[in-house]
Image: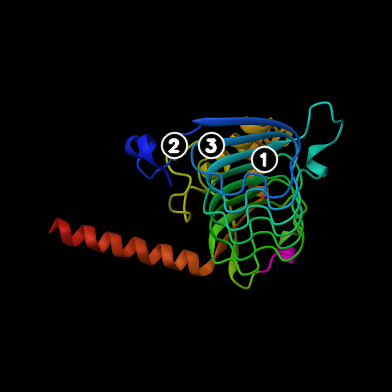
Amino acid sequence: MLSGALAKQYGHAGLPEDSISVKLTGTAGQSFGAFLARGIAFELEGEGNDYVGKGLSGGRIAIYPPQDSGIVPETSIIAGNTLLYGAIDGEIYLRGVVGERFAVRNSGALAVVEGTGDHCCEYMTGGCVVLLGPTGRNFAAGMSGGVAYVLDEDGDFAIRCNTSMVDLEPVTGDPKAALDNLRGDMRYHDAARLYRLIENHARYTNSARAREILDNFDSYIGKFVKVMPTEFRRALTELSAEANDAEHVAGE
């Protein structure tokens, strides 16, 4: 919560984007960037441990390996387990592979990562996760909200996804369409949302994987799968219908 002069100037919405930017190198300990507030950006050239971005609250985190490390980011671990646990807002971009339970209980953060272990998006209730690489088993267990876009190059994602609460759909739409709000109605604008998030990933981590996909997006878009919770879609549809009815009544 803001106080004093900052509260008077910015209210409770938080600081303007990138008001505070921190560049770090090396290996971060547990819970790097936990509860990071809006307007604060952490950039780490190195690697993280478990619980990166725990409770993320509007800030931005980017982690990427050192240029002289000699590793292949798409197949190398960049951070540990249970990242983005309980996040409510903000963004995280990880150039590399992470461990198990990525984005568990995420309720509003945006995330891009290049591979995960088991149980990704477990109990997720909001936000958006983009996977640019392979996932482990039991993806989307208990996922009741938000969406995920998964690059399924081998065509076997369906057998690793827990579909008890979600549907798997193609990614459609115009990737260059205007999209003011990445957290807008997630029934629509999938291609544009996906393209924008991958653009962000390339900008903040210099990901070669992201740039390859952007440069060849027409050939990649058909390889992405949208993970959409069934009850989430129903709720969005009902809310939209109620809003339309209210507008109709007000216009009479």
Residue 181's x, y, as percent? 44, 43
Q: Quadrant of the C terminus?
A: bottom left
Residue 55's x, y, as percent? 57, 53
Mark 2 Cα-neighbour bin, 10 Å: few <14, some 14–19, many ≥20? many
**Is label 1 in a helix, a strand or a loop?**
helix
> First in sequence: mark 1 or mark 2?
2
Residue type at the position of mark 1: Ser
**Is label 2 in a helix, a strand or a loop?**
loop
13 relative to 119 in the view: left or right: left
Give me the residue at 63% from left, 57% from top.
Answer: 85
Tag count in the figure? 3
Magenta region: 158-162
**Residue holding disc 1:** 219
Q: Nearer the viewer, residue 195 or 87?
A: 87
> First in sequence: mark 3 or mark 1?
3
Report the disc number at residue 15: 2
Q: Are the residues flagged by discs 3 and 2 in contact, CB closer than 8 Å? A: yes
Report the disc number at residue 102: none
Distance of label 1 from label 2 (alpha carbons)? 39 Å
Give me the residue at 57% from left, 30% from top.
Answer: 21
Residue 125's x, y, as percent? 53, 62
Residue type at the position of mark 3: Ile
**Residue holding disc 3:** 40
- Which residue extends farthest bottom? 164
- Which residue extends farthest left? 252
- Which residue extends farthest front? 4
